[in-house]
Image: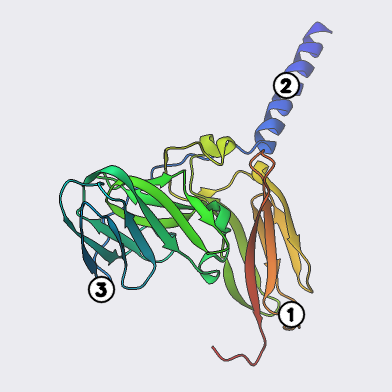
Amino acid sequence: MKKLFLILAVTTLFFSCKKSTIDKTPELPSSPLITTAGTPDGTPSSKLIKAAAGGSITSADGRITVKVPAAAFSSDQMFIIQPITNNTGFGIGKAYRLTPEGTTFNKPVTISFNYTDAEVTGATPELLSIAYQDNAGAWQSMNQTQVNTQQRQLTVTTTHFSDWGFFPLVYIEPGDARVEVNETVDLKVMYAIDPADADLFPAPIGNTPLTQPIQINPSYIKKWNYNGTGALTPNGSKAVYKAPGKAPLQNPEAVNAEINFRKKETYLLVSNITVLSDFHID
């Protein structure tokens, strides 16, 4: 009888452990986002800024502005903003090389990026971050990025120059899709911060390394939402959208995921999916 009880206990323990392994979704490993430096991709802007007065310089495309306070450096400097390729694969728009590179300022300078609503499709402005590339090629997120949603502007202060760009820390992939009637689209929520830092989000002042984007832990998905004539099948951090049998009257259709990092704030990520009719023209 004791032997039978022992067998049952071991069997129960085996299946209990097996079930726990299946049900639990572990945090995924992440690696630093390291890329090659971007190459020139656009017209550079240059301006001589006087040390005593300070000043500002804006890129030729109007996308980035650097404001330099008086006495930030000891002698007059020629400042250059060079647009470069963004080699991260998920950064928004171009990156920018600010020179004189490697300069350390006596006072912080202000870097501001402008964005458009179309550029942040699939993301949300509150989860955008300005980042710079360090000497090792790793991208460092500036946790103190200030977001002005009214002016559609991101701002940080820094005491050094490097290559700079801005990124969605969390986003739906794809954020914008086109699909035939009755076809499906696989959606997933990605994030580019270390899973260990997620519960601290928004992160404290300082820098946090960006990581290779990974699929978000399902525990941070509050719920998926869809109200249309097709179908949505949620599955943790993923979902499958199936288009209706004909193009809907409201097109594109919106699928959104509510994200909560165990804080009070809830963030909404939206994927816009256009359903094509049988007679569409690409």
Amino acid type shown at disc 3: Thr
- In the image, residue 92 lies at what x, y percent? 44, 63
Q: Residue at x 22, y 65 (%)?
A: 47
**Is residue 44 found left or right of 164 in the rendered image?**
left
**Residue that carries the numbered disc 1 in the rendered image:** 250
Amino acid type shown at disc 1: Gln
**Is residue 66 found left or right of 135 in the rendered image?**
right
Q: Is residue 280 above or below residue 216?
A: below
For marks 1 and 3 on the same chain, the one whose residue lies earlier in the sequence? 3
* Mark 2 → mark 1, Cα distance in angstroms: 53 Å
Q: Is residue 216 something that shows in the picture? A: yes
Task: Say which of 111 and 52 sits in front.
Answer: 52
**SS state under label 2:** helix
**Is residue 238 found left or right of 77 in the rendered image?**
right
For marks 2 and 1 on the same chain, the one whose residue lies earlier in the sequence? 2
**Residue that carries the numbered disc 2 in the rendered image:** 13
